[in-house]
Image (spheres, rainbow, N blue to C red):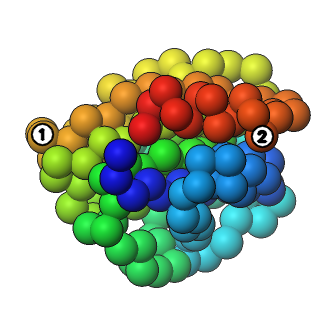
Amino acid sequence: MGKTLVAYFSASGTTARIAKELAQAAGADLYEIRPATPYTKADLNWSDKKSRSSVEMSDKSSRPALADRNADIAEYDTILLGFPIWWYVAPTIINSFLESYDFSGKKIVLFATSGGSGFGRTLAGLKPSVAADTVITEGRVLNGRQTAAGLKAWAETVI
């Protein structure tokens, strides 16, 4: 078993909480994927077709700018990659992250938070953003309270 990173994007704090708990349970390092321009409450207004998140999610080629590219991906064998589900897929900032680093030969396991949907077409939307020899798999939707023992047990099965 090599070194593991929990990388996550969180717009409201829900995914951040789970990611921190997962990193601690798995004995992994933690990295926050941050947009260059943080999302405001108005940006996340799903009912407004002109809100930033709605515009980004309507354009599958959208790649929101990242605040930094400081993750030392080369140091890790496995990346547990977390995000909220937006419109049954990962937010396009996850594609920005994946396209900003070389994940060749790495294993990426997805985890998500969601208000009620599963992964939908998330995996299909993310695979083109990594090298062909990157193993990227659907992990789990981690909603609600998670126990440290439960997170550790899940991490041990995927790392």
Position of residue 100 measured from the top left corner of the image (x, y, whole percent): 30, 66
Residue in the image at 74% along x and 50% along y = 21
- Between tags 1 and 2, which lies in front? 2
Residue indicated by mark 2: 148
Alpha carbon separation for disc pair 1 and 2: 33 Å
Q: Nearer the viewer, residue 74 or 120?
A: 74
Residue in the image at 46% along x and 63% along y = 64
52 to 114, vertically: above or below: below
Which residue is most to the right? 145
Would you say residue 157 is visible in this rendering? yes
- How would you rate the neighbour count of disc 1 (Cα within 10 Å): few for under 14, some for 14-19, many for 20 or more? few
Query: In terms of image quadrants, where is residue 42?
Result: bottom right
- How would you rate the neighbour count of disc 2 (Cα within 10 Å): few for under 14, some for 14-19, many for 20 or more? some
Q: Secondary structure at mark 1?
A: loop
Would you say residue 100 is visible in this rendering? no
Left or right: residue 67 compared with residue 50: left
Left or right: residue 34 compared with residue 116: left
Left or right: residue 120 compared with residue 134: right
Q: Nearer the viewer, residue 66 or 54?
A: 66
Query: In terms of image quadrants, where is residue 46?
Result: top right
> Looking at the picture, which amino acid does disc 1 mark?
Ala
Q: Nearer the viewer, residue 44 or 153?
A: 153
The quadrant of the picture occupied by the C terminus is top left
Q: Secondary structure at mark 2?
A: helix
> Looking at the picture, which amino acid does disc 2 mark?
Ala
Residue indicated by mark 1: 132
121 to 14, vertically: above or below: above
Left or right: residue 125 compared with residue 45: left
Q: Nearer the viewer, residue 52 or 21?
A: 21
